[in-house]
Amino acid sequence: MNKKFGVSAIFATFLIVTVVVVLAVSATTEDDKSDIINNIDFDKKLLDFNDTLYNFETVTTNPTAFLDDAADGQVTLRLLGQNFDLKLQKIHIVSDNATITAADGSISDAPKSYSYTGTVVGEANSSVVLTVGDDVLIGEINVDNKSYYIDQTAKKYNNKVVHIVYSSDEIKKGNILVYCTVFPVIYFVPHVRKS
């Protein structure tokens, strides 16, 4: 009877360990899918930001996860190793029924995009402007005298748009940053990005 108890105990232990490992792997995989910003190992030399920025991170974004989180007006973004708890308000810049008329006269639906403004929770001197579309998330977070940027590139990584994340401290002198808050797009002057 001791042998049966021993085999049963070993089997029960094996079963419990298997369930715990499967649940841990499932939770990790699920979290990876729901992360809004994911760092990637992308060759920065393929991007044309080295003349403009001292340093930047390459990331992909998950706009669907962002929109899900933003539904309650609160989102946490992790940029450059720092968490930003954001209080956001959706603003309408482009009509949901907007169309694009091409030079040849053809008309198509404009891509859906959503813009948000807000603040960083607990930071009195802060502002946030973010725009999210089908496969991009761009914007600016300002805290005191420092800005953090998310910008898209023309490159893809695993079928997702490669984005860069950087702070105002990383902008090389002589490069003026212009950020349009009406339609959030980041421009560098005088350099023109090729990527």
Image (cartoon, grey):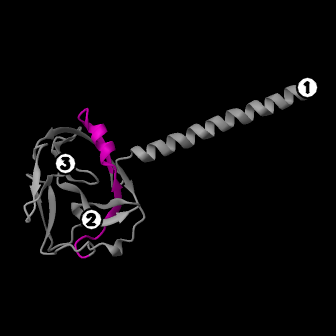
Q: Point out the frontmost of discs 3 and 1.
A: 3
Please provide percent x and percent y for residue 141: 21, 50
Give the camera-side residue of 79 and 32.
Answer: 32
Whether tag 3 and tag 1 are in contact, CB under 8 A, the answer is no
| Magenta-tinted stretch | 51-78
Give the residue type that dot 3 points to.
Answer: Ser
Residue, disc 2? 153
Q: CA distance from mark 1 to mark 2?
A: 66 Å
Q: CA distance from mark 3 to mark 2?
A: 17 Å
| Mark 1 surroundings within 10 Å by alpha-carbon count, few (fewer than 14), some (14 through 19), many (20 or more) | few
Give the residue type that dot 2 points to.
Answer: Thr
Please provide percent x and percent y for residue 181: 10, 52
Residue drawn where x is 26% and y is 74% of the image:
48
Residue drawn where x is 80% and y is 29% of the image:
9
Residue, disc 1? 2
Q: Which label number is shown at residue 113?
A: 3
| Mark 2 surroundings within 10 Å by alpha-carbon count, few (fewer than 14), some (14 through 19), many (20 or more) | some
Quarter of the figure with residue 70: top left
In this picture, residue 123 sits left or right of residue 3 = left
Give the camera-side residue of 170 and 59.
Answer: 59
Disc 2 element? strand
Disc 3 element? loop
Give the residue type that dot 1 points to.
Answer: Asn
Does the magenta-highlighted stretch encompass residue 150?
Answer: no
In this picture, residue 172 sits left or right of residue 40 = left
| Mark 3 surroundings within 10 Å by alpha-carbon count, few (fewer than 14), some (14 through 19), many (20 or more) | some
Residue 65 in the image: above or below residue 58: above
Q: Point out the frontmost of discs 3 and 2.
A: 3
* Label located before the other in sequence (3 or 1): 1
